[in-house]
Image (cartoon, rainbow, N blue to C red):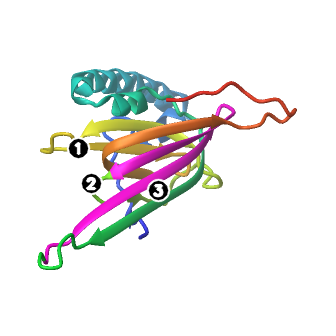
């Protein structure tokens, strides 16, 4: 099943919005300076928010929250959803879903494997996104508790093409392995 694609929505990200990113990179010095102040406030507010929910995070979610994946290249993304009937006499379908994001970051390949509680939503970039839509790199992400759901989380990722991926999950696994260096040697293993 393919993930849902939504129309552009600047409000998906709570702290590191596409609009703020665009202003931060403005050629207008005054606009960039104002955005720099707003960016510093967003960093502070997001860190405070993350600190407030950290106690309710399982260890594997905390590990993902601590990753810094800025500029990681998106190699692939897949979502698998399966529905099934656990009992022939019980006409209530159940479903399970997982998603895998594969990234290349600092000489390693990293897979984030999410166990989902709802479908992933991809929010397209606005039509006036001024940056390249070739290639797709991780810019900024936000981790949040799902509203009204204990043990459910949402991971939002802003990519370099202006799109935002909204991943509703209850558990996540991160796995990395070194990629061969261009000179034939290997780089040190990094695992989250």
Query: Mark 3 and mark 2: span between their CA atoms?
Result: 25 Å
Determine whether label 1 and label 3 are within 8 Å by CB: no
As drawn, is 83 to the left or to the right of 90? right
Q: Which residues are magenta?
A: 91-115
Marks 3 and 2 in Cβ contact (< 8 Å): no
Q: Earlier in the sequence, mark 3 or mark 2?
A: 2
Crowding at label 3, few (<14), some or many (≥20) Cα neighbours within 10 Å?
Answer: many
| Residue in the picture at 82% in, 29% down | 185
Across and down, in percent, residue 176 comes to 57, 36
State how far apart marks 1 and 3 are (Cα). Answer: 26 Å
* Of residues 29 and 181, the one drawn nearer to the viewer in this rendering: 181
Q: Which mark is residue 152?
A: 1
Label annotation for residue 125: 3
> If you read the primary sequence from the N terminus, does the residue marked by circle 2 or circle 1 appear first?
2
| Residue at image coords 20%, 72% | 93
Residue 188 within the magenta-colored segment of the rendering: no
The answer to whether any part of residue 26 appears in the image is no
Q: Which mark is residue 117?
A: 2
* Residue 190 drawn at (x, y percent): 59, 27
Using the rendered view, name the quadrant where residue 7 is placed. Answer: bottom left
Relative horizontal placement of residue 32, taking residue 85 as reference (left or right): right
């Amino acid at each position: 099943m393919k993930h849902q694609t939504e129309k552009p929505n600047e409000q998906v990200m709570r702290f590191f919005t596409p609009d703020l990113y665009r202003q931060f990179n403005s050629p207008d010095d005054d606009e960039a300076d104002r955005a720099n102040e707003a960016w510093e406030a967003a960093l502070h507010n997001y860190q405070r928010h993350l600190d407030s929910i950290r106690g309710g995070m399982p260890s594997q979610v905390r590990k993902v929250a601590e990753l810094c994946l800025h500029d990681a290249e998106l190699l692939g993304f897949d979502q698998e959803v399966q529905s099934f009937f656990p009992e022939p006499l019980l006409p209530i379908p159940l479903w399970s879903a997982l998603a895998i994001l594969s990234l290349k970051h600092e000489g390693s390949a990293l897979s984030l494997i999410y166990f989902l509680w709802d479908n992933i939503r991809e929010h397209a970039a606005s039509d006036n996104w001024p940056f390249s839509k070739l290639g797709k790199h991780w810019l900024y992400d936000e981790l949040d508790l799902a509203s009204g759901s204990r043990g459910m989380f949402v991971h939002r990722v802003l990519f370099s093409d202006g799109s935002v991926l909204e991943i509703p999950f209850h558990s996540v696994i991160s796995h990395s392995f070194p990629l061969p260096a261009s000179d034939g040697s290997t780089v040190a293993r990094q695992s989250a």
